[in-house]
Image (cartoon, helix red, strand yellow):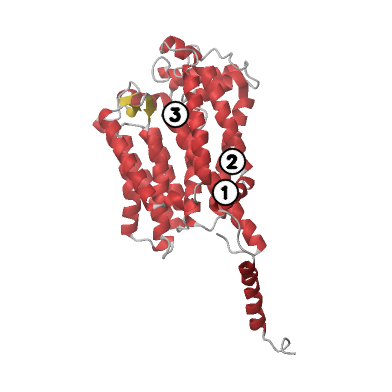
């Protein structure tokens, strides 16, 4: 009789107490080690195959193509063993997989922790200053790397990820209490200060390809912040005008001259400069034309035998096109496109600001760098020397891109786990 007189709120409180009573009666025998194993297993079950499969395939395929493209250059140009670059690239790939796994299992909040953000910012600025003063170049005046324990380190690659992390931390902090449209001038100054310092230091090397990628990263993070289209277009217009003015000043002052100015002229008409600045682009055309649809066969490229300069780095896609044909190119581009689309999908579907900015930044990084590399090879844009993600030879690029893929996988796993909890009626972590 008394049970029927209870109010719905009283019955709800009584049901809420029941699980606690059962928990008090049954002691928790789960050890911390078992709990960690359980969390690890849950993350493994939620691995995103749309990210994992393209990443592993590209990393393996890139290592194979580095071997195919670098044998002649390793022997003749550098007087090394035939597998010199291949062995080093295998080592970079193994380190990259290790970094990927570690990044995948870290807590998501770790990537925007103030200590990590500050460390990334100081490390990037310090390395950019050091490479400008003491670094090595590519033989045409640029200083873009230095040697550490026998390994060439390229600070511009570290700076790309650093810009993503720093802007993610700052912008998500600013947007906790205000909308993107309510940001004031002081907020924009703080947000743009670090990226612009990095861009100026990279431009003085000069590495104009990396500058283009960094500018794209800045604007990509802003476009997913919910900012008003008019405000965004003003920012974009300002950056375009500032970049154009800087280019004009560089040409008039003589800063952009010699080989760098020659690359711009070769972009307008590579056949007029076919023996100098346009030589590499034209040899790339020959490789693409020789490959056709099906290619001449893996390892049978003729252009890599001294005709195409540095075929294992930024022009490795020309070797792929010659040996595996258009089908090989489409597979590589398709795998990269899959990663970019998955990253942007995560950025557009999540409710967490930090996740949104990280995913958008990493997806833009891979997408824009692919476009700049292929665009330079095909003559759509001036040649800048940007590597093809996961494919070109390079330790810093391979390891940093693998780290970014680990962060993307971490984001995807957490999003999947949160959606599953929501479907079960639990509160997301």
Mark 1, other Cα within 10 Å: few <14 / some 14–19 / many ≥20: many
Please say if 417 is above or below 373: below
Please state the horizontal and vertical placement of residue 64, each as a whole percent of the image: 56, 22
Please state the horizontal and vertical placement of residue 198, each as a whole percent of the image: 33, 41
| Residue with the mark numbered 2 | 51
| Residue with the mark numbered 1 | 412
Of residues 380 and 339, the one nearer the viewer is 339
| Residue with the mark numbered 3 | 395
Distance between the alpha carbons at the discs numbered 2 and 3:
21 Å
Asked if residue 373 can be seen in this view, the reply is yes
Mark 3 and mark 1 lie on one chain; the one further toward the N terminus is 3
Distance between the alpha carbons at the discs numbered 2 and 1:
9 Å
Mark 2 and mark 3 lie on one chain; the one further toward the N terminus is 2
Of residues 105 and 173, the one nearer the viewer is 105
- Residue displayed at 51% across by 23% down: 316
Please say if 185 is above or below 371: below
Mark 3, other Cα within 10 Å: few <14 / some 14–19 / many ≥20: many
Please state the horizontal and vertical placement of residue 27, each as a whole percent of the image: 61, 63
Asked if residue 374 can be seen in this view, the reply is no
* Quadrant where the image shows the C terminus: bottom right
- Residue displayed at 32% across by 22% down: 140
Do the numbered discs 2 and 1 sit on residues whose CB atoms are within 8 Å? yes
């Amino acid at each position: 009789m008394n049970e029927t007189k209870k109010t719905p709120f009283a019955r709800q409180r009584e049901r809420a107490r029941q699980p606690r009573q059962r928990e008090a009666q049954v002691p928790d025998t789960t050890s911390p080690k078992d709990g960690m194993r359980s969390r690890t297993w849950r993350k493994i079950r939620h691995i995103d195959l749309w990210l994992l499969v393209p990443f592993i395939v590209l990393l393996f395929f890139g290592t194979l193509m580095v071997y195919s493209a670098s044998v002649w250059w390793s022997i003749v140009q550098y007087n090394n063993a035939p597998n010199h670059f291949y062995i080093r690239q295998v080592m970079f790939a193994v380190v990259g997989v290790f970094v990927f796994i570690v990044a995948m299992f870290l807590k998501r909040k770790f990537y925007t922790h103030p200590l990590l953000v500050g460390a990334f910012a100081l490390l990037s600025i310090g390395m950019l200053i050091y490479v400008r003063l003491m670094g090595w170049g590519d033989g045409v005046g640029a200083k873009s790397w230095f040697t550490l324990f026998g390994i060439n380190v390229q600070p511009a690659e570290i700076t790309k990820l650093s810009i993503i992390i720093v802007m993610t931390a700052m912008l998500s902090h600013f947007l906790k209490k205000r909308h993107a449209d309510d940001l004031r001038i002081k907020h924009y100054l703080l947000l743009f200060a670090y990226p612009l310092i990095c861009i100026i230091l990279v431009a003085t090397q000069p590495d104009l390809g990396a500058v283009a990628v960094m500018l794209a990263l800045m604007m990509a993070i802003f476009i997913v912040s919910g900012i008003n289209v008019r405000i965004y277009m003003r920012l974009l217009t300002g950056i375009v005008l500032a970049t154009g003015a800087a280019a004009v000043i560089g040409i008039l002052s003589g800063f952009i001259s010699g080989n760098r100015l020659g690359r711009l002229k070769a972009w307008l008409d590579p056949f007029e400069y076919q023996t100098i600045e346009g030589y590499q682009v034209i040899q790339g055309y020959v490789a693409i034309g020789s490959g056709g649809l099906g290619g001449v066969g893996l390892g049978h490229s003729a252009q890599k035998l001294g005709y195409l300069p540095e075929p294992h780095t930024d022009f490795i896609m020309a070797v792929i096109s010659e040996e595996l044909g258009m089908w090989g190119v489409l597979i590589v581009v398709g795998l990269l496109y899959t990663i970019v689309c998955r990253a942007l999908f995560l950025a557009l579907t999540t409710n967490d600001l930090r996740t949104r900015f990280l995913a958008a930044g990493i997806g833009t990084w891979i997408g824009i760098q692919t476009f700049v590399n292929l665009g330079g090879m095909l003559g759509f844009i001036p040649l800048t020397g940007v590597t093809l993600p996961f494919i070109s030879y390079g330790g810093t690029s391979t390891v940093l891109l693998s780290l970014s893929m680990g962060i993307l996988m971490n984001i995807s796993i957490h999003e999947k786990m949160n959606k599953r909890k929501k479907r079960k009626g639990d509160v997301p972590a």
